[in-house]
Image: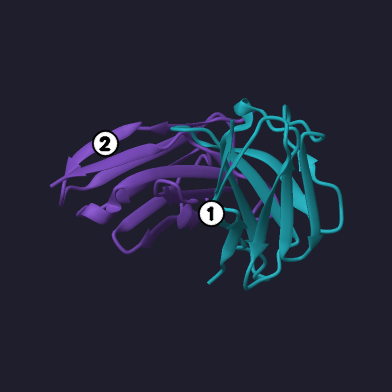
Chain colours: A purple, B cyan
Amino acid sequence: GQQLNQSPQSMFIQEGEDVSMNCTSSSIFNTWLWYKQDPGEGPVLLIALYKAGELTSNGRLTAQFGTTRKDSFLNISASIPSDVGIYFCAGQLALGGGADGLTFGKGTHLIIQP
Amino acid sequence: GAVVSQHPSWVICKSGTSVKIECRSLDFQATTMFWYRQFPKQSLMLMATSNEGSKATYEQGVEKDKFLINHASLTLSTLTVTSAHPEDSSFYICSAIKRTGAAADTQYFGPGTRLTVL
């Protein structure tokens, strides 16, 4: 089946630093999504990308949909303590949300040191 | 916004018993819902697609007779883990698609249900 390779697996940074994480796939996805999951809770959607090459921002978060449709990155600028959590990329074959389940990356665990 | 709830939030049961988990879309109708499973420190894995009024579609390797899915209304899907065993202990998360009529439909996740089988 399809797999998403997400890196890094974990990040230890200082408050205020910028963060970058990415996902690559062996196959094409038509939709890329980035989620944040806090312990014991469901994922919360951060950014959704629907077009190859699309660059989208949500506050301090910026994500891009790779032109090959096989990769995406997420940047967080000026990290704050509440950014701590696990970030997942997810790919979907169907266009614009559609009716396909998501394929998730393995997650990036972000830890912020004060 | 779009709110998806799950009940119960956690459940502990004895091996061999069956457990039902509910997933509700509170402020929108969802013709399609999904069930995922997440083991500790791992990612979410899609188990099945739940379609209102029709049979669920299961991912490869997921036993349909063990994980019974019923999507009887536009706001409710249930997952029943039958004859649960300790290896079924996991975090079960549902999601629901909110149709906006545009190209960008969004999948919203519930808060998850922690199942522990003794």
The answer to which of marks 1 and 2 sits earlier in the sequence is 2
* Front in this rendered view, residue A19 or A53: A19
Q: Kindly identify the amino acid type of the residue bearing the numbered disc 1.
A: Lys
| Tag 2: amino acid | Met
In the foreground, A113 or B21: B21
Q: Residues within 10 Å of mark 2 (few under 14, many from 20)?
A: some
- For the point 55% across and 29% down, the residue is A26
Q: Which mark is residue A19?
A: none
Q: Nearer the viewer, residue B36 or A95?
A: B36
> Can residue A93 be seen here?
no
Q: Chain of mark 1?
A: A
Residue B93 x/y as whole percent: 58, 47
Q: Residue furthest front?
A: B14
Residue B64, image x and y in percent? 80, 35
- Say which element carries label 2: strand
Q: CA distance from mark 1 to mark 2?
A: 28 Å
Q: What label sits on residue A11 in the rendered view? A: 2
Whether callout 1 and callout 2 share a subunit is answered yes
Along the viewing direction, whichever of A63 and B8 lies nearer the viewer: B8
Q: Chain of mark 2?
A: A
Q: How many marks?
A: 2
Q: Which residue is mark 1?
A: A51
Q: Residue at x 62, y 51 (%)?
A: B94
Looking at the rendered structure, the secondary structure element under dot 1 is: loop
**In the figure, A25 relative to A60: above or below?**
above
Residue A47 appears in which quarter of the rendering? Answer: bottom left
Percent across and percent down for residue A58 are 37, 62
Q: Is residue A107 left or right of residue B65?
A: left
Tell me which residue sits at (29%, 52%) in the image: A83
Are circles 1 and 2 on residues that touch, CB within 8 Å?
no
